[in-house]
Image (tube, helix red, strand yellow):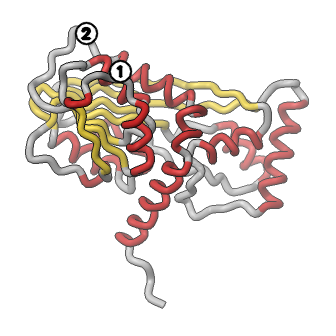
Amino acid sequence: MLPISRNLQQAQAKQAIASHFGQAAAAYHGEAQMQRDCAKQLLSYLSQPLILPPGKILEVGCGTGFITQELVQSFPDRSLEITDLSAEMLQFCRTHLQTLQHNLIEFRQLDGEAIASASPYAMIVSGFTIQWFADPIATLQNWRSQIQEGGILLISFPTCQSFPEWRQICTELNLPFTANPLPDAETVWTALAQGFSQYQTYEENIRLTFNSASDFFRNLKAIGTGFNSTGKQLSLSQMRRLIEYWDSQTKQIAQPITIHFHVAFGVLQR
């Protein structure tokens, strides 16, 4: 049997990611509170009053519309191009978006790694999307080339410093750590330093709690992030062992399961 080409593997992975998120659209909108909070936080880092060059604002990976809703409120007179890899997520966003300016908004199903526009954008915005890309840095550099002079790239993403508690439990039990690889913030910012006249970056540890380890893993699955790109998978007995051990550690101190997400935010201006 011939080996599957890298391009085919990536295409299959994208299809699987879109499918996972599409099936989870309604649950995501209700349960992804951390992503909702980070959407508001991302827009808050824009200095006011903000002067953007003429042109559209592009959102990559709109999901169910957490950032989209903030954009239409912050830029009511600006044309917006709203995109997502998942048709179901895009439709959910379109249906639930609260705005009277529908004539200024274009919705498009689009792969964020394949953006090519004839006209440069005034701003590209993307929250919690680049960690799903095969090559986040190359993609961000492509986005940079499609932003006008004076335009802005506004991004957020969970970093490789996320999930220290999960990682530690796996180390103690000598089990594979099966979380998807996440970008290193310093590597991303260093790669983007050239080509932007100024930029500001922010990083924050966000603490979430769950009643049990099972609840944590159910939440990942419910919001569509359960897709595993590592090729690593625990057997049922290994997963049961992990959950029971993790729960036992927190019961000893009568505390819920604690998970830390390390989130990076960037405002970069050409």
Residue at mark 2: 48
Q: Are marks 2 and 1 in contact (CB under 8 Å)?
A: no
Q: Residue at x 43, y 29 (%)?
A: 66
Report the residue that reaches farthest toward the bottom: 1
Q: Position of residue 182 (x, y in %)?
A: 49, 45
Q: Is residue 185 visible?
A: no
Q: Residue at x 50, y 49 (%)?
A: 21
- Viewer-nearest residue: 78 or 199: 78
Q: Secondary structure at mark 1?
A: helix
Q: Residue at x 63, y 54 (%)?
A: 178
For residue 47, side relative to residue 131 (left or right): left
Quadrant that contains the C terminus: top left
Q: Type of residue at label 1? A: Leu
For residue 170, side relative to residue 226 (left or right): right
For residue 242, side relative to residue 148 (left or right): right
Residue at mark 1: 43
Q: Position of residue 207 (x, y in %)?
A: 63, 25
- Quadrant assignment, res 184: top left
- Quadrant assignment, res 156: top left
Among numbered discs 2 and 1, the one appearing first in the sequence: 1
Q: Position of residue 269 (x, y in %)?
A: 20, 26
